[in-house]
């Protein structure tokens, strides 16, 4: 799993505006996009290779 210091100051791809759902004691309305390696042993977060505005569509 990623540690908080691995995430601070970086941009990630999210799916948002989802139906609110309680997760780990908090109300979640979005999800970070990630991929699995071929062996499905590691989760890899999607990180844009350049700065893009918040809300940019993912195709």
Image (tube, rainbow, N blue to C red):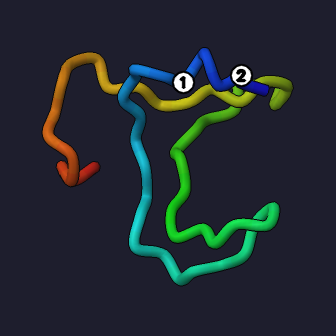
Q: Which residue in the structure is indicated by mark 1?
A: 7
Mark 2 neighbour class, 10 Å CA radius: few under 14, some 14 to 19, many 20 or more: few
Name the quarter where the N terminus is drawn.
top right
Residue at screen point 57% across, 80% down: 20
Task: Give the structural element (helix, strand or loop) at label 2.
Answer: loop
Q: Can you give x and y, in whole percent of width and height, for residue 50 in the image?
A: 21, 19
Q: Which residue is mark 2?
A: 3
**Residue 9: percent from left, percent from top:** 40, 20
Answer whether labels 1 and 2 touch (C-beta < 8 Å): yes
Residue closest to the eye, 58 or 2: 2
Above or below for 56 versus 18:
above
- Find residue 24 and report its horizontal and vertical position in percent: 81, 61
Element type at mark 1: helix
Q: Residue at x 43, y 58 (%)?
A: 15
10 Å neighbourhood of mark 1: few (<14), some, or many (≥20)?
Answer: few
Q: Is residue 12 left or right of residue 25?
A: left
């Amino acid at each position: 799993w990623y540690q908080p210091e691995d995430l601070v100051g970086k941009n990630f791809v999210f799916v948002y505006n989802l139906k609110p759902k309680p997760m780990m004691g908090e109300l979640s309305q979005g999800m970070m996009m990630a991929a699995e390696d071929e062996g499905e042993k590691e989760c890899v977060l999607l990180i844009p290779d350049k700065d893009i505005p918040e809300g940019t569509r993912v195709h």
